[in-house]
Amino acid sequence: MSADPREKPFRPAWWLPGGHLQTIVPNVCRLRRAPMLRRQQVTLPDGDFLALDWGPDPGGPIVVLLHGLGGSSRSAYARVLMRALHARGFWACMMHFRGAAGEPNRKLRGYHMGEREDPAFVLSELRRRYSRRKLAAVGVSLGGSALLHSLAAAGEDPPVDCAVAVSVPFRLHRAEERLNRGWSRLYQGHILRQLRRQWQEKCRVLARPDLATGLHEIRSFRQFDARITAPLHGYADVDDYYDRASSIQVLRDIHVPTLLIHSLNDPFMTPDSLPDPDQLSPCVTLEVHRAGGHVGFLESSGRSYLERRVPDYLLVQLQKK
């Protein structure tokens, strides 16, 4: 395994103008297969469970991927990153948040932007079990937000050696407003349909049909978060959730090398959502591109910038350890 010191800069595909095409085409039309995956169920301290999907083990460092809202190991970005990491010698796995692996979890609790306990538990367990191997984590969108919260909460004893977070909605109030404007409402509608189906199935399995009443009336993330996310995860209301779960406020508390990859034309948020330099820990590097969409970053060659940038960054940082 080696990182290329002559790494080329990201050049967005000229034939995908605008943030919407950079978001949609790479995440809908990319058909590249993922490596064969092996599922492992992990029992959590409260008796609930989540699933890890492991790729083949080539013997290198372990990398845990954390998916976005409504995502899984079947997501296009997950397939691309799993293949790219395996090709560079990493043993990669996808950590599914509760209820995201195709099977309802045992409790009403699910996952959210400020989720830190479940990633921290999984990463700590992997660190304990594979103590002789280096460990890194990569979070995408919501998964990136949850990862940043977990790293900040760990303080000077982080469970990983380095991390990457891609397309993180740093300020949730602004992201919520952005997703209610223009074409961005299409993403909101698509993800909400998935969330409503998952919640309805969970209520059926847990014999709580009362909690699914009026679910079809939810038409925005704010309504979903006000009714379900905030009360189930200990927040006073939706504004309290958006305030406390915004990762902008925890970036200065991170004590492990962490790369943030962001695009100015991300249709899930606005350019003024980015953190200022004084809001970053010395360990955190913010990499901002003029284009790339939301978890898109497709280059003119048709390949993903993420599939070379993420492994390269991890290799450089792990070689320092």
Image (cartoon, rainbow, N blue to C red):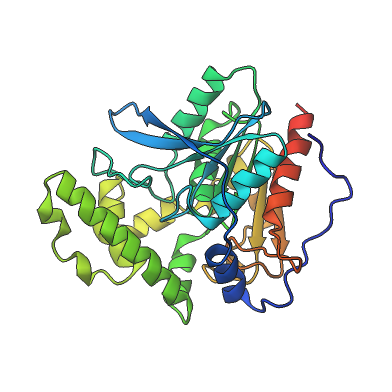
Residue 268 visible in the displayed image:
yes
For image coordinates 48% across by 66% down, the residue present is: 175
**190 left or right of 90 in image:** left
Q: How many marks are shown on the rendered structure? A: 0
Vertically, is 321 above or below 185?
A: above
- Tell me residue 2's x, y (percent): 82, 36
- Tell me residue 292's x, y (percent): 66, 67
- Identity of the residue furthest to the right in this view: 6
Q: Quadrant of residue 196?
A: bottom left
For image coordinates 45% across by 53% down, the residue present is: 71
Q: Quadrant of the C terminus?
A: top right
**194 left or right of 144 in image:** left
- Tell me residue 198's x, y (percent): 28, 54
From the viewer's side, name the closer residue of 163 and 199. 199
From the viewer's side, name the closer residue of 197 and 177. 197
- Tell me residue 90's x, y (percent): 66, 34
Q: Quadrant of the N terminus?
A: top right
Q: Quadrant of residue 135?
A: top right
For image coordinates 34% across by 61% down, the residue present is: 194
Q: Quadrant of residue 228?
A: bottom left
From the viewer's side, name the closer residue of 185 and 87. 87
Residue 282 visible in the displayed image:
no
**212 left or right of 51 in image:** left
Vertically, is 124 above or below 245?
A: above
